[in-house]
Every structure is written in C-alpha cells, then in structure tokens.
Image (tube, rainbow, N blue to C red):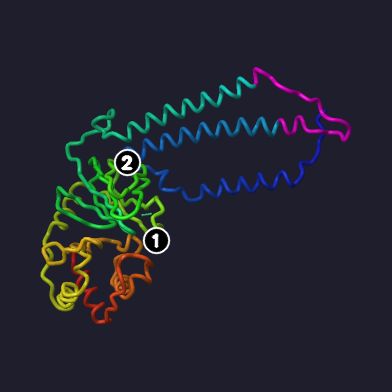
Amino acid sequence: MFSSRVIPTRRVVPVLVLLSMILTGCAGLPPTLLPASFDARVIFNLTMVTFGIATVVFVVVEGILIYSAIRFSRRTSEGLPKQVEGNTRLEIAWTLAPAIVLAIVYVLSIQALRSVAYQPSTSSGAGDTSQALHVRVIGHQWWWEFDYPDLHIVTANEMHVPEGAVVNLDVESVDVIHSYWVPQLGGKIDAIPGRVNHTWFRAAQAGTYHGQCAEFCGVEHADMRLDAVVEMPDRFQAWVEGQQAPVAQMTGDAAKGEQVFMTGSCVACHTIDGTQALGKVGPNLTHFASRQVFAGGVLDNTPQNLAQWLADPQKVKPGNLMPNLHLTQAQIDELVAFVASLK
Ligand code: CUA
C-alpha cells in the first residue's frame, strides 16, 4: 500500500527552482503582452490561447507523471514491481490527443496569419483604409530611416503616425538583414537588402511604443532601436507641418556650425533639405532637433550627448559608419548649436 515516505530533497529542489523562474518571469510584463494595435491584438489572442492549451497539456502530463512516479515507485527492496507492457487504447489516446491539439493550434494560427497579413479592408470588420499612410522603413547598420514619400518627409529612429489610421510599411535594408519590430503594434518583419517586404498596422491608442531590431545585424544590433509615436490626428498633422517646414535661418553659433557642417565632410553623408547637404549614408538631419533620440535610438537628444557623439562616434557606438572627424571643441560646440536649431 501507500507508504508515507518523506520526498527526497533532490526531487524538491529542481521543482522550487523551476517555480521561482516562472514567477520571476512575471515580475515585469514584456510589452508584447500589452497590444496597442489590431494586429498585435490578434497575435496576443493567439499567444494566450496557445499558452492556455499548453498549460492544460503541461498540467495533465506532469500530473500523470507525478502521480505515476509516486503511485508506482518501488516500495520494498525485494523484487521488481509488477511489469506492464503495451496498452492499445492508451497508445491510440496519446497519439490522437496531441494530433487534435496541434490541429486546433494550426487552424487558429492560419486564421491569425491571414488576418494580420491583409489590411482591414480585406479582412473582416477592422475598419477604414481611406486615410492610409505609406511609410518606407529602411534598416541601416544601426539605425532606422523612415521615409514618407507622399508627405516628402524623411526622418530617423522615430516614426510618427496618427492614431486609428492604417499605416502601410514597405520594409527594406541598405546593408544586411535587419528585422523591424514594435511588439505592441504587430509582428516582426525582416528588412532584407534588395527586397521590399510589406506589412501594416493600425494603432488603437496614442502613445510612444518602443521597437527593436530583431535580427542579429552586427555588433551594435542590440542598440538598433526605434520609437513609434502614435498621435491624435491633429497632433500628427502638426508634426507633418513641422517636418515640411523649411530650415530656419541660422544666427550666432548656429550659423558658424552651419558653416562647419556645409564646408566639412558632414554633407557627404547627411541630407538637410533645401541645402547643398545631400548625403544619403547617414540619417537625414533636416529636423533633427524635433527628435527625442538619436544614434539608433540609444541616446537622448541633448546637447551633452550630441557633443559626446561628435567628439568620437566610434567610442559611443563602435563600428557605426560615422568616423571620428577630429573636430575641435569649438567646432563641436558650433555644430551642436546648429543641429539643435534644426527644429
Ligand atoms: Cu539591425 Cu539587428
């Protein structure tokens, strides 16, 4: 019969370790679990259903395993317990049950894939595409370029979109494979050189959503971030007008900085609309000062960070394409004044 034996410590410890790992994982919810768009909601729902099914399977399988281990373990040192071999009904059951579970997950996954692959107009009941916005998302080592061809705006690391509008993204890369991912707004999509991948999202709620390159793309892969800024339509319109405005007339240190910029090697890599700076290698700086972050989203846009960056970009982000220009402190200060005036 059932003997009341103390369970050995070596069996308890791994269970406690596992439990503590599971519980600490819940401490800070990853943003993946806080969907803020139609697609992210679909992905979230699928995740939850799959997780629910997996939990039931886990509890049932582990329950049977633990029950069997206790119920049928050897209790005396004499002889083997009763040996059992083969049970056709059980074998059919444990083959069929997983097949049915996988078939359910498969059908749900296909449904979710279809509804995120097509725009709301072609999938059921998700709204209106009349004011769709088109944005080209271009991956660079290691920053993101956002080109709004219909609005003639090019920016970097910070993508502004209106709440509730369908946003069509054409995702490309100029160098290696990157992966565009803003977890709260939808799934990942690869940015592949020589190819344009399409995706879309429709943000349900204004806010700033952090994104991250999700494909290893070199030493600074982890620091290839982006912010998707979802705004109410009137604020988005104000942003558009700000970005379309011509560059202001510079005075004082900013004018000196402009001189340094336009006569130095900066123009070879950067564009400032309406000037002779037409470089395409680095980020378009036309309205640089309107951005919250720079350098692939890793530095806050402050004069101190800018000065540090200009003094030696390689020290801040080793391997990035901006060389150390060996600027003097005066040149750095003037350049900071200039780019900080590019509002
Ligand atoms: Cu770009 Cu990882």
Where does the image place residue 104, in percent across and percent down from the top left? Answer: 47, 26
Please name the amino acid that badge 2 sits on. Answer: Ser
Where does the image place residue 160, in percent across and percent down from the top left? Answer: 24, 51
Q: Does the magenta stretch include residue 243?
A: no
Q: Which residue is drawn at 30% across and 50% down?
A: 193
Query: Residue 282 lies in what quarter of the image?
Result: bottom left
In the rendered image of this protein, does residue 186 appear above or below residue 263? above
Where does the image place residue 251, in percent across and percent down from the top left? Answer: 13, 75
Q: Which of marks 2 and 1 is nearer the N terminus?
A: 2
| Mark 2 or 1, closer to the camera | 1
Quadrant location, the C terminus: bottom left
Crowd around label 2: few <14 · some 14–19 · many ≥20 (10 Å): many
Q: Which residue, given by chain and number where applicable, does mark 1 sit on?
A: 220
Please name the amino acid that badge 1 sits on. Answer: Glu
Magenta stretch bounds: 68-90
Q: What element carries label 1?
A: loop
Q: Which residue lies furthest to the front in this view?
A: 194
Q: What element carries label 2?
A: loop
Crowd around label 1: few <14 · some 14–19 · many ≥20 (10 Å): some
Q: Is residue 87 magenta?
A: yes
- Taking the image in four quarters, ligand 1 sits in the one at bottom left
Q: Which residue, given by chain and number where applicable, does mark 2 sit on?
A: 37
Q: Does the residue labelled 1 lie within 8 Å of ligand 1?
A: no
